[in-house]
Image (cartoon, rainbow, N blue to C red):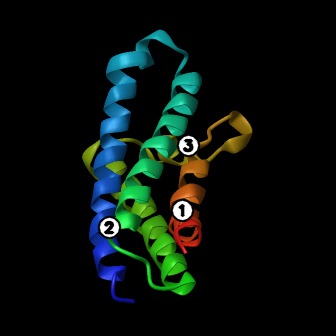
Amino acid sequence: MGSFFIYTICWFGLALLAIINGALREKLYGAFMKELSSHQLSTFTGIVIFSVYIWVITGVWKISSPFEAVLIGLSWLIMTVLFEFIFGYFVMKCPWEKLFNDYNIIKGRVWIVVLVWITAAPYVFYTLRS
């Protein structure tokens, strides 16, 4: 459990990378693609960026056990969902409908894949590094 606190702090790096990824979507390719396509591409680029970041931090701060890896992933999931809804609603002034819309996989909204990945990634990288 020694590195759990460090990984909680590292989540802020994930949040910053997510904001940068969203800004890149808006500034670089969002205007040239349909909104759904840019959302899906942004989901893919986010997963790639997060993977590199998580690979680096798992090399610097070793996760001590599979249990700790699962705990880190679950805490990142909770922090991400809370941030998305709190920041999205109160700061970005997005209506609840829009926030919940990103979870509609039937409509091609694939944001949930990011959530699954950031939950699983600590365990995946712990296993790869063990």
| Front tag of 1 and 2 | 2
Q: Earlier in the sequence, mark 1 or mark 3?
A: 3
The residue carrying pointer 3 sits among few (fewer than 14), some (14 to 19) or many (20 or more) residues within 10 Å by Cα, namely some
| Front tag of 3 and 2 | 2
Between 32 and 85, the residue placed more toward the observer is 32
Between 94 and 3, the residue placed more toward the observer is 3
Identify the residue at horizontal 39%, vertical 76% (top origin): 62
Identify the residue at horizontal 32%, vertical 20% (top origin): 27
Cα–Cα gap, marks 1 and 3: 21 Å
Q: Residue furthest top?
A: 32
Between 59 and 8, the residue placed more toward the observer is 59
Q: Position of residue 85 (x, y in %)?
A: 40, 55
The quarter holding residue 24 reads top left
Residue occupied by mark 3: 102
Amino acid type, mark 1: Ala
Residue occupied by mark 2: 60
Determine whether the residue tagged by mark 2 lies in a helix, strand or loop: helix
Identify the residue at horizontal 56%, vertical 71% (top origin): 123
Determine whether the residue tagged by mark 3 lies in a helix, strand or loop: loop
The residue carrying pointer 2 sits among few (fewer than 14), some (14 to 19) or many (20 or more) residues within 10 Å by Cα, namely few
Amino acid type, mark 3: Asp
Q: Is the Cβ of the residue at disc 1 closer than 8 Å to that at disc 3?
A: no
Q: Which mark is residue 72?
A: none
Residue occupied by mark 1: 121
